[in-house]
Structures are given as structure tokens and as C-alpha cells.
Image (cartoon, helix red, strand yellow):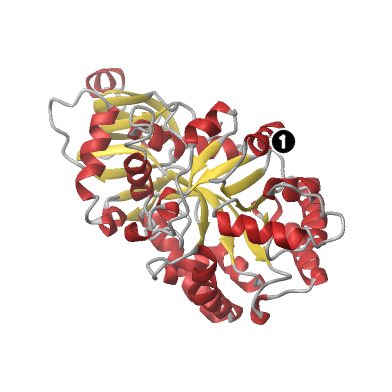
């Protein structure tokens, strides 16, 4: 075979496999052919196996660097980039004071296009190459996002028909017709996205869910982020015909067809046992956003601690998300760090960096149904990876120690996580170089 069909990458390699297992090769060789991973092995073995194919032109040495899969951020609002570090006293107040006024600006086409170029360039630079994204209500904003995004993403325009600012309120027909139009244009890349039950009428959720299910699209919304939110939701729905007897937030989504194997529920912090049973039965996934849920002093909304052990015991699938702008920083390294740190007291043995990496990569790909082609560095998958300059200490024994040394020291300089990645590669092509 011609040597130009191969590219060989030298460096330390991390390859997440599960919550408890992550391959670590201190000196490794990643072999890429036609945009796919051909092989992954220790450097000495690789140099022998491919000695006749390796040349000075196709061997790239990422010296003192770590090669690892690109991230999947399974819950973020690209239109909230400008408010992610704003003061956060409570979820509902933060939305009214900062988020809604910012999202109104995306009614302007030129503004949306400019912001989309800026945001998705930054996202690629942090190593995120997949996930689930919320846009504003506006058609031109989601069109701009679809044009600029790079990787395996589903994106939806939020739907808002009630209890919303006048400038961000759509009629039910407007929401449904736009959903039909966007599904026709973007197919399965479109994600049906009621903002949450507070702002979206049952009619829109029911009809939109039907359209999304028919087209094989994903659905996403917010569920049980704060106790105040839950109380407000139930107070609204108990006055709506057909919903007078609903007992839980999850019941509302169940009755409107929002649950299912392609449904992503953001947060899910305050869920009862019965609600978790419903999520398991419907194969609905929960997306945990630790940096957004973190205490206010840590620039979060103070929503509470997600009980991942209870969620796993209930056999509900879950992955990690940044929740930009409830979360203050774009990098999934910060999200991983926050997950580990917040669980140090309650579950120190289970909340590991290996688990956080898995839930930031392969777990998200599995939920999106693209894990056969991406999500980690398994053979025959797409060559989608990131490179992080990091000189590992020679006595490192495993992936956990490597991740701890790489991520831990920056916890007091959190914005620095956004500068960790030196290269982002998607399907064998370098789409970012620092």
C-alpha cells in the first residue's frame, strides 16, 4: 500500500472504554488511514509493525503530549456564550435578567452569523466535536449554528409559547410550523427542543414530539433542575385541562410524548424513585451539568448535587454537559474537574477522572447513537481526537493518575482549561491548531 495513505501519530494515548476502564499507553502510536483509526499500540511495537510504511513525511511526533478522543458536550446553549460568567442568584432570576435579553439579539441575522462563527470556532478549540445544543427561538440563529458547527451534533431552536418575554414568545402554530420546516431542512441533525415545560404548551410538545419521532430526530429539554422550578411547573400544569392530576415534572413530559430513547433531559437533579423508573422504562437519558449546578461561589446556579449513583442504580443512562451559559466555561476538562470535586465527599471512589472522561466522550456518543463510528479511539472508528501538551511524570501508572496531574493543578485558573488543547482532529483532518 502507498505510504501516503497512512499517518502515524506519536504520543501518550488515553482511550476511554467504560466508567472504570481507560487504556493508557505512555508512549504510543496511533495509526490513521483514510480518516479512520487503523491501529493503536505501544510505540516500540508500532515502529516494528509499520517499519516499511513509516516515513519522515507521514510520522507526526506529538512530543510531551497526550492524544485522547474529542469531547461530547451533551447539553449546552450556544446563544448564551455572552452570559456564562454573569452573576447567578437563582435559575429563574438569571434567565429573566441576563439570558432572555441576550437571546433576543439573535433575531438579527447578521448578529447570529457573527456569533455562530465566533462560538463554534471557540468550541472546536476546546476539543468538543459532538453533543446536543440549544439555539434561540429564531430560525436564522439555528441556520447559522448548523452552518458553523463541526462534528456530530444535534441542534434545536428553543420553543417558547407561554410565560415568556413578549419578544421571545411564539404562537403554537409558529412553533409547530417552524419545527416541520427545520426537520425537512436538517433531518436528524435537528433536535426538537421545548425550552422547558414552563414555556412550552402541551399542544406544541405533543405535536412536535410526534413529528420528531416520525423523523427519527432527538428531543431535548430541561427537567427538575431546581425545587423552585419544579414547584412553578406543577402550579402551572395543575390549571391546564388534562394535567390537573399530574404529580411530578416527569409526568408532564410523559403525557406530552417527550420521553423516549432519543430524549435528553438536562439536569435531572431532583427526581423521585418513580420518576427514575419512568425514565428507565422509556429509555430516556439524563444529562448532568456539574459546573452549572455548582454552588454560586463556583460560578454555578447552586441547583444541587446530581446523584449519579442513584441514577445508575435505576439504570438510567447519563452523560456530561457544560450547560453553557449556566456553566461558566466551555471546556469539558472543567466539567470533568467539577464532577470529581463535587463528589469528593459523597462518592470519592466512584467519581473518578476515568469515569468523567468516559461520560464526556463515549457515553455521549452512545446516547446519540454514533458510538460505532466515534466516541473513543477504537480500531476502525473515525480518527477524531484532541492533543493536549502535557509532560507526564515517568512514574505514572494509569489513566487516573495522568488525568489528575493534567487537570487538577488548573482548578484555581479555570479559564485556562479552554487553552489546554493544541490540536483538534475530526475524521483525520486537523480542524484546529493552536
Q: Please name whichever residue, 358 or 87, is drawn nearer the observer in this view of the structure.
A: 87
Q: Secondary structure at mark 1?
A: helix
**x, y percent for residue 377:** 42, 31
Drawn side of residue 311 relative to residue 252, left or right: left
User: Where is the N terminus found, in terms of image quarters?
Assistant: top left
Which quadrant of the structure image shows residue 239?
A: bottom right
Drawn side of residue 186 relative to residue 37, left or right: right
**x, y percent for residue 131:** 53, 48
Asked if one can make out residue 54 in the rendered structure from this viewpoint, the answer is no
Residue where numbered disc 1 is placed: 282
Task: Name the residue: 42% across, 42% down.
Answer: 428
Where 1 sits versus 301, above or below?
above
User: Where is the C terminus found, in terms of image quarters?
Assistant: bottom left
- Packing grade of label 1 (10 A; few <14, some 14-19, many >=20) is some
Drawn side of residue 239 relative to residue 355, left or right: right
Where 167 sits versus 268, above or below?
below
**x, y percent for residue 166:** 67, 81
Where 284 sits versus 330, above or below?
above
Q: Please name whichever residue, 91 or 365, is drawn nearer the observer in this view of the structure.
A: 91
Task: Name the residue: 56% across, 54% down.
Answer: 227
Which quadrant of the structure image shows residue 62?
A: top left
Q: Please name whichever residue, 152 or 6, is drawn nearer the observer in this view of the structure.
A: 152
**x, y percent for residue 11:** 24, 34
Task: Name the residue: 43% across, 56% down.
Answer: 302
Q: How many marks?
A: 1
Which quadrant of the structure image shows residue 134?
A: bottom right
- Identity of the residue furthest to the left in this view: 394
Drawn side of residue 418 relative to residue 210, left or right: left
Amino acid at each position: 500500500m502507498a505510504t501516503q495513505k497512512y499517518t502515524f501519530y506519536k504520543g501518550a494515548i488515553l482511550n476511554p472504554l467504560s466508567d472504570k476502564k481507560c487504556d493508557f499507553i505512555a508512549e504510543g502510536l496511533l495509526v490513521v488511514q483514510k480518516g479512520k483509526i487503523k491501529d493503536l499500540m505501544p510505540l516500540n511495537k508500532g515502529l516494528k509493525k509499520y517499519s516499511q510504511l513509516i516515513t519522515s513525511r507521514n510520522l507526526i511526533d506529538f512530543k510531551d503530549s497526550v492524544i485522547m478522543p474529542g469531547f461530547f458536550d451533551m447539553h449546552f446553549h450556544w446563544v448564551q456564550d455572552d452570559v456564562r460568567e454573569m452573576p447567578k442568584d437563582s435559575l429563574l432570576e438569571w434567565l429573566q435578567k441576563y439570558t432572555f435579553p441576550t437571546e433576543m439579539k439573535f433575531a438579527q441575522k447578521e448578529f447570529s452569523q457573527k456569533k455562530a462563527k465566533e462560538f463554534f470556532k471557540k468550541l472546536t478549540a476546546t476539543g468538543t466535536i459532538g453533543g446536543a445544543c440549544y439555539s434561540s427561538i429564531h430560525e436564522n440563529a439555528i441556520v447559522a449554528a448548523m452552518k458553523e458547527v463541526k462534528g456530530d451534533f444535534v441542534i434545536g431552536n428553543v420553543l417558547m409559547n407561554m410565560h415568556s418575554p413578549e419578544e421571545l414568545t411564539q404562537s403554537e402554530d409558529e412553533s409547530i410550523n417552524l419545527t416541520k420546516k427545520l426537520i425537512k431542512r436538517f433531518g436528524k441533525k435537528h433536535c426538537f427542543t421545548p425550552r422547558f415545560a414552563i414555556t412550552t404548551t402541551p399542544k406544541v410538545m405533543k405535536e412536535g414530539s410526534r413529528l420528531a419521532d416520525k423523523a427519527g430526530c432527538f428531543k431535548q429539554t430541561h427537567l427538575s433542575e431546581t425545587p423552585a422550578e419544579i414547584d412553578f411547573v406543577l402550579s402551572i400544569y395543575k390549571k391546564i385541562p388534562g394535567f390537573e392530576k399530574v404529580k411530578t415534572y416527569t409526568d408532564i413530559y410523559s403525557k406530552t410524548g417527550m420521553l423516549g430513547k432519543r430524549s435528553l433531559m438536562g439536569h435531572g437533579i431532583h427526581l423521585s424513585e418513580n420518576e427514575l423508573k419512568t425514565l428507565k422504562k422509556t429509555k430516556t437519558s439524563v444529562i448532568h451539568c456539574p459546573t452549572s449546578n455548582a454552588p454560586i461561589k463556583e460560578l454555578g446556579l447552586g441547583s444541587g448535587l446530581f446523584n449519579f449513583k442513584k441514577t445508575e442504580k435505576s439504570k438510567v443512562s447519563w452523560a456530561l454537559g457544560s450547560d453553557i451559559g449556566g456553566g461558566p466555561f466551555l471546556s469539558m476538562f472543567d466539567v470533568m474537574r467539577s464532577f470529581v470535586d463535587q463528589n469528593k465527599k459523597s462518592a470519592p471512589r466512584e467519581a473518578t477522572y476515568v469515569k468523567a472522561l468516559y461520560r464526556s466522550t463515549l457515553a455521549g456518543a452512545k446516547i446519540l447513537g454514533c458510538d460505532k463510528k466515534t466516541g473513543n479511539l477504537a480500531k476502525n472508528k473515525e480518527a477524531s481526537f484532541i492533543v493536549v501538551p502535557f509532560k507526564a511524570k515517568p512514574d505514572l501508572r494509569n489513566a487516573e493518575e495522568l488525568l489528575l496531574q493534567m487537570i487538577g493543578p488548573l482548578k484555581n485558573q479555570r479559564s485556562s482549561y479552554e487553552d489546554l488543547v493544541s490540536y483538534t482532529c475530526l475524521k483525520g483532518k486537523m480542524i484546529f491548531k493552536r
